[in-house]
Image (cartoon, grey):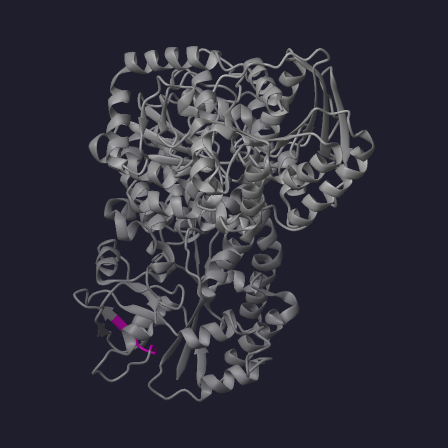
Amino acid sequence: MPHEPRSNARGLRVLVLGWEYPPSVAGGLGAACHGLTTALARSEGVASVTLAVPRVRGAGEAVDGPGIERIEIDVPPARGEEALLSPYGPVGVAAKGARAGASRALYGGDLGDALQAYAAAAVDALDARAGTFDVIHAHDWMTVPAAMQLRMRLGAPVCFHVHSTAFDRAGTARAAGPLARPDGLAARIEAAGVRAADRVVAVSDFTRGVIERGYGVRAERIDVVHNGATIDEAEATSATQASGSVAPSSDAARSGMLSSGARSAAGQDSGGQGSGEPSTEPPSAAASIAAAPLSSTPTPAPADHTVLFVGRLTRQKGAGYFVRAAARLAEQRDDVRFVVVGDGEDLPRLVEEAAERGLGSRLFFTGSVDDVTRDRLYADADLYVMTSISEPFGLTPLEALGRGAPAILPNAAGVCEVLPSAPRVDPWDTDALAERMGELLDSGDERARLVEAGRAEARELTWDRSGARLAGVLQEACAP
Amino acid sequence: MTTLTFYFQVHQPFRVRPYQYDEIGKNHDFFDDWLNEDVVKRVTSLCYLPMNDVLSRAIDRTDGAVKCAFSISGTALRQFELWAPEALESFAALAEKNDSVEFFCETSRHSLAALADEEEFALQVDQQRALLKKHFGVTPTTFRNTELILSPDVARQVEALGFDLLVGEGADGLLRRPHEPARHPGQLFHAEGVPGLPILLRDYPFSDDIAFRFSNQGWEEYPLFAPTFLRWLEELPEERRVVGLFMDYETFGEHQPKSTGVFEFMDEMLDLVAAHERIDFSCPRELPGRLDAPVELAFDRPYSWADAERDLSAWLANPMQRSAHEAIYELGPRARAAGGELAETWRDLTTSDHVYYMSTSADTDGDVHEYFSPYPSPHDAYVTVMNALEDLRRRV
């Protein structure tokens, strides 16, 4: 639906209600809100952006771009385990360190109370400013109670930006608890939000369809604004060239056995002999003391193909389909290695399934990894496979393309709309998925072509484009 | 006359540190030297040195009437060399009390090779013989297979390697067979089809009184004192000629801490037996000459001394364990062909503890597995070992 930006002499004054926002970022929502809000502030026809976000203690220094006024709202600190409600899942699947802290603070056990507190405090903080905002832009269901109360106080229309729906998140229901169930609090707030908002923005046509069918909202009330993506294009490195750092670099390695990593690093410093005693005697089998060859000479990976999965290991992400398709392909050929990156409630079950399907020496689990490691894994991969059952947008295929790995996408993902060149499958058809993987692994030319085409499409996905489009939608919301 | 045979198992594995997929092919140093050093030093000071001292003094003051046997895995011996030479010296001093102390042979890696790779089994036995010769100057004649895993096939392999006695678990499933009168473990046996190799079985009730129940305050016999234990032995019927008291050596001071009084218990018990008229100690190697001819044992499956099932399920029950076990032994021929350090590294991955850590048994034995495991979960153990194996696979 085309939008004619309404001519407005002074420009739009936008109140943005955010929940997860830098510096407290638990997952992709924070990055998306940040990208949209900063681009919005730069957009033509926007006079001012005021950002109201929860104050997260210890999150670090807030740095906002020009033209953004930040109001921090005090909310009670959450207790208990984090509920897995973060709409995009953690960026790059890592939920450790600062991110885990932000995740607990923002999606902790008392989320319902926190939302009400956020709403009340936001009203207190903004009550006196009636008439100074033209439109309220509310990100995801967490800000809906605040948006609805502020609409009445401030007399400004609400544009509700949906980053994910309860239907997508249902895959995480077991870990997230009753709050995240399709009939739980989140879903009820979300349903009320999409019905009551003056306009609804969906992150994809796919999500627009979910809102339309799931909540009975007429399609013409929903606009689609695709997220931007700043993809970092790196030269593709083949698996044999990638040697990189030898020190354990993942979070898991550091938190697991720090001392061991420290020792091996020390061994490398002293000339690559490692921590053992260099053997001075001829190797007699019984007397061999230092059995472990401790040198750190990089050993080239065999000339195999690597197929990668990256995502939180929940039902929503469909890693089980990846394992089953891997088993299928592994029956047909032995030159493919599979790597599953990420952690989550399904990890133990997936590990057992891989073992049971005879993938012990073929499929590897990395657990959570840091961004540097993740990027290296993308670069080492010949093919990236996304198997989500329901994905509002889905950033990982863009990350993979950035590092030179073409992606197979699931039909039910918003990212398909911005990467029309990418091959698509229904992930539950694991035979077809295996066949598609096999075909692409056999054709280096086709993979190179897909990377070229995908990167060209991804370059169009600038945040400024998203910001301009969003500004148009907000203008529309203000139209009488 | 009833004779007691103590056999103490000494073992430390080379545990694998959390080894990430990302390190495969780049960092070949996947054993957890810091943890392994820490454990072997701790157990040396808590158990090996003080218990060796208890035994050594008891042997001396009873003029050798106190007797016992050890099986020390090759991986433990190597860890002593690396990190706890005082433990090695202490065992070597015991070895000099030749008539009172026997050393068993086992596989050099405390491995499951007897189940998976007959050639490798023989090679690891040779390695262990060489280690025992080198460190203690002894030539073992009794064999102990990893975790007392026993079947006619194991017995056949052990006999072919020239041993005179094999030890096993006195499991109910072996001794109490349907439609047959129950048999007692106080005699020698042989496996069906292997008449030439006598088998001495563990008496698990007596062994576990010391190894497991000793400090259990919920046990009706708690606290156990040496005279009580001796009275139970005195009450045994005449035909129970031998009582095999087999246990982890780490029982003393590690599983049962010093504060439980386990050292004092042993001190007194050894003296009471040494002075007893109808009960004495034997080294296992003496038994074939002392006891009646072996009785045949029928096997319905392999037996071991682990978990309540006394079968192989502690190592080979779930898909992860079977997957890892198969992957490890699949690499054997290539590792041996590569030879040298690569083969020895591969052998360190054959240690049974690696698959033991992958056990998912949820009952009380799960707690035992967890007690020993350096990993947060069986799945971590599996993923880690498969990563290490992949690194090795790319190098052999």
Residue at position x 70%, y 40% in the image = A149
Question: Is residue B235 or residue A476 the one in the foreground?
Answer: A476
Residue B144 is situated, as x and y percent measured from the top left of the image, at 35, 59
Q: Confirm whether residue A278 shows in the render.
A: no
Q: Is residue B128 placed above or below A8 in the rendered structure? A: below
Q: Is residue B22 left or right of residue B266?
A: left
Question: Left or right: where does residue B204 sit relative to residue A34?
Answer: left
Q: Position of residue B394 (x, y in %)?
A: 35, 28
The image quarter containing residue B1 is bottom left
- Magenta span of residues: B185-189
Report whether B154 appears left or right of B16.
Answer: left
Is residue B186 a member of the stretch shown in magenta? yes
Q: Quadrant of residue A291?
A: top left
Vertical position of residue B39 compared to residue A159: above or below: below
Can residue A446 be seen? yes
The structure residue drawn at horizontal position 33% and vertical position 30%, both measured from the top left corner, is A337
- Residue A273 in the image, given as x and y percentages of width and height: 51, 25
Is B274 rendered above or below residue A401? Answer: below
Q: In the current view of this chain or complex, which residue is farthest to the left?
A: B193
Picture quarter with the C terminus of chain A: top right
